[in-house]
Image: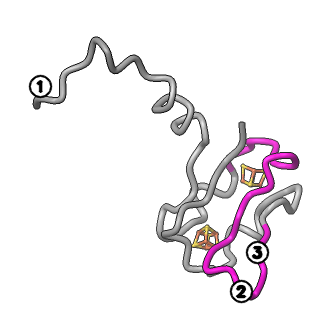
Amino acid sequence: MSYIITDKCTKCGACLDVCPVKCIYSTPEDDQYYVNPEECIECATCVPECPVNAIFNSVFVELNAEYDFSKASNKAE
Ligand code: SF4
Ligand code: SF4
């Protein structure tokens, strides 16, 4: 697990300055930054720094992927 950055990223660079392990990367060709999951220590320091709320814990990706849809309803509760 690690933190992930979505396509809402504007490449403002604010998260780069606060990340203690400097694990946020991109190339000039990229439209957004990416977190290296091998290096991220899940400290969450970057999350409140992002002005467009583009950074999330990847646990939510895993929760969605592992959800048991067989017992769930797609009607509004
Ligand atoms: S959670 Fe911490 S280590 Fe991971 S990208 Fe954000 S600031 Fe860096
Ligand atoms: S703070 Fe948010 S918008 Fe700025 S570079 Fe980081 S992820 Fe992208």
Give the residues drawn in magenta, as a range: 25-44
Confirm or deny contact between disc 1 and disc 3 (CB under 8 A).
Answer: no
In the depicted structure, whether residue 43 falls above or below residue 73: below
SS category of the residue bearing label 1:
loop
The kind of residue tagged 3 is Ser
Q: Which residue is mark 3?
A: 26
Residue 38 locus on image (x, y percent): 86, 46
SS category of the residue bearing label 2:
loop
Q: Mark 1 and mark 2: span between their CA atoms?
A: 44 Å
Q: Residue at x 46, y 32 (%)?
A: 64
10 Å crowding of disc 2: few (<14), some (14-19), many (20+): few
Is 32 inside the magenta-drawn segment? yes
Confirm or deny contact between disc 3 and disc 2 (CB under 8 A).
Answer: no
Q: Residue at x 80, y 55 (%)?
A: 36
The kind of residue tagged 2 is Glu
Q: Which residue is mark 2?
A: 29
Q: Mark 3 and mark 2: span between their CA atoms?
A: 8 Å
Tag in front: 3 or 2 = 2
Q: Residue at x 11, y 31 (%)?
A: 76
Rendered-image quadrant of the C terminus? top left
Residue 58 locus on image (x, y percent): 61, 41
Rendered-image quadrant of the N terminus? top right
The kind of residue tagged 1 is Glu
In the depicted structure, whether residue 69 falls above or below residue 56: above
In the depicted structure, whether residue 25 falls above or below residue 19: below
Q: Mark 1 and mark 3: span between their CA atoms?
A: 41 Å
